[in-house]
Image (cartoon, coloured by chain):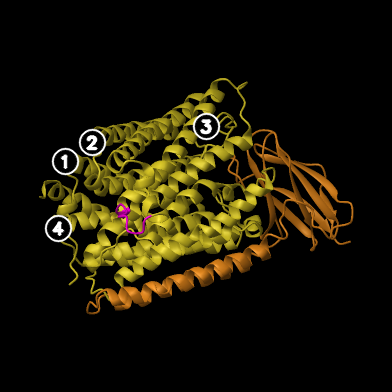
Amino acid sequence: MANTGDSDFVAPPSRIGRQTVLAYLGVSGAVLLLLMLFGFLMRLSQGELLPLPPERFYQVMTAHGIGMVGVAGFSGAAVMWWFLSRAVKLSTAVLIANLALFLVGVVLILGAVFLGGFAGAWTFLYPLPALSGGQWGESAAATYLLGLLLVGVGFLLLYLDVARAVIVRYGGLARALGWPSLFGDETAEAPPPVVVISSVVAIINIAGIAVGAAIIAMSLVNIYLPAFAIDALLAKNLIFFFGHVFINATIYMAVIAVYEILPRYTGRPWPSGRIFLAAWNATLLMVLIVYPHHLLMDFAMPVWMLVMGQVISYASGLPVLVVTTVATLANVHRSGIKWDLASGLLVLSVFGWAAGIVPAIVDGTIVVNSVMHNTVWVPGHFHFYLLLGMVAMVFAFMYWLGKGAGATEGATDRAALLVFACAGVGFVGMFLYAGKESVPRRWAVHLPEWIAYDRIASVFALLVVLAAAVFVLRFLLSVGRIASAR
Amino acid sequence: MRDIAWITSLIGMAAVLALFLRVAWHASDAAEGSEAATAVTRVRAPLFWVLALAIVVVMAVTLGGLPYAAPREQTAEPLTVTATGQQWSWTLSHEGAAVGQPVVFAVSSSDVNHGLGIYDESLGLVAQTQAMPGYVNYLHHTFTEPGTYRLLCLEYCGFGHHDMPAEFVVTAP
């Protein structure tokens, strides 16, 4: 008999840990809503429905981009920590330190952008931070990079703690990744999915953040010592390695909610089988070597790396489509699941992830990338699997926590889910269609031929923001109840 | 190519949607235990092999003619056009070429990263490459239609990113 989910027996063992995760989610919800509003403003501005000066547009774009990357990592970490803390002994002090560093970093970044005028995009491609064309000063660029560095240090501490805790509990990362079961003894018991996925995330993000910190530090030096020049192509490689790994890890952390919560609705366990282990170990390898697909139009790159970028882009779709998607559908099919906000958002999220990677993989084809790269096709596919995938997983987690603490859901919540799903598809669909029509990304002012797409997208964006506001408000209203629930 | 990408993506996304709708439609039916799950899991192996085969075919078809070198069939000496990006304009060594004349754009930047996007008269993107300081990217292209092509920036480069258009006139042979 399927049940409707029951949260309290999988809450973190320490009260302070639970409260800190809830603080993560509260901050995430508020920041997410603000940044979604920024996105809506950008679409309005491109559609000439809001007079946003280009310099302000690019500042908003920078805040939206880096903020969304950060909040995705932050909220994903909340999901991971909540469940992982039941399996291994994590440090609450490190969790709190990451919260503090994140908040300080966010303040510095927002100050750099809206007070200092920094608008170097989240990618801060060298040497743009130092060469703004007279639009922002050294201190604004340095403050932005310093803020980013602090956020990175916080996350690095968190992932080091995850790795430490997993190694202590399982006797090594190889065991935590299920290698004995995968490569040796079929009867060996593999760690649960939350441990395997968290280990993957810790490994890739420690590497990714270390690389990101290196290029941030180099860029910082360059701002004040221009003679300290960096190879522009090397800088791009470092930035996209870091960016690719980090943003993918946000989905991996959030999908833990699917693995942990969905079985409670369907009554069907979701153990770490060999196919699951193979998929996640393959993902670990592929996510580290696929990043050159961001550089397919950098013709100076070694061609073998670009070909590898295309091949691995396609291969990396297999674990998602063949393993996670099929396993989700198998878990749900004729299970007697009771649909509510959490279960509905969870299934929607796996759909969003699986469907969103289709246009992403297509764009990873070099001959397609020649006519799609840096068009709005790119935000089309990543909004698909981040908005309708990763973010939906976090919202599902919020609702599941609320339900476990006795919070109720009503017609407004169900309507919000319907609006979120439909308007979300419309929103990303407009990006994809406009990308097919070659509309460039990151343009503050659009040509008259493109404005209709922006206006239609603005309507969808507004609906998505309203639906998300319902989700976040519902969580904030129930957070006290969750914090005190037994 | 853009239409192929669009239609391929639509078909792929629609297939995923159909799968989810079909399963979701029957998800809340009376629970059938693990047999129902096994029924879905059975598609995993064939799905893997179908997708793996599709990947091999796509690689074979698409990796043959990469844009990083001149096309093999090209025998005529190309016209070299240097294109240098700077905040916020393009400097071109030539203002145009003839239809059928192979052109190699030698693309670079004198300040930050830019992207050279070549747009036809209907605002369709026909080719692009990045413009990087310290590097020259060679973009080979042979225009097949006459017209006034627009060169737009495709890598964010600061506040004038959207406002650095240039033109390249392609004349009938």
Give the SS element for disc 4: loop
Query: Which amino acid does the dot numbered 1 rest on?
Result: Ser
Q: How far, Cα to Cα, is label 4 from label 1?
A: 22 Å
Task: Look at discs 3 and 4 and give the one toward the viewer.
Answer: 3
> What's the colour of chain B in the image?
orange
Residue A14's label in the rendered image is 1
Let me know if marks 1 and 3 both belong to one chain: yes
Classify A302 as above or below A266.
above
Q: Residue at x 30, y 47 (%)?
A: A80
The location of residue A219, given as percent across then percent down, is 53, 28
The location of residue A272, given as percent across then percent down, is 33, 58
Q: Which residue is mark 4?
A: A407
Q: Residue at x 37, y 74 (%)?
A: B40
Confirm or deny contact between disc 1 and disc 2 (CB under 8 A).
yes
Q: Earlier in the sequence, mark 1 or mark 3?
A: 1
User: Between residues A474 and B68, which one lies in front from this camera angle?
Assistant: B68
Q: Which residue is mark 2?
A: A92
Report the magenta residues as a range. A185-193
Query: Which amino acid does the dot numbered 2 rest on?
Result: Thr
Q: Earlier in the sequence, mark 3 or mark 4?
A: 3
Left or right for A278, reference A254: right
Q: How far, Cα to Cα, is label 3 from label 2?
A: 29 Å
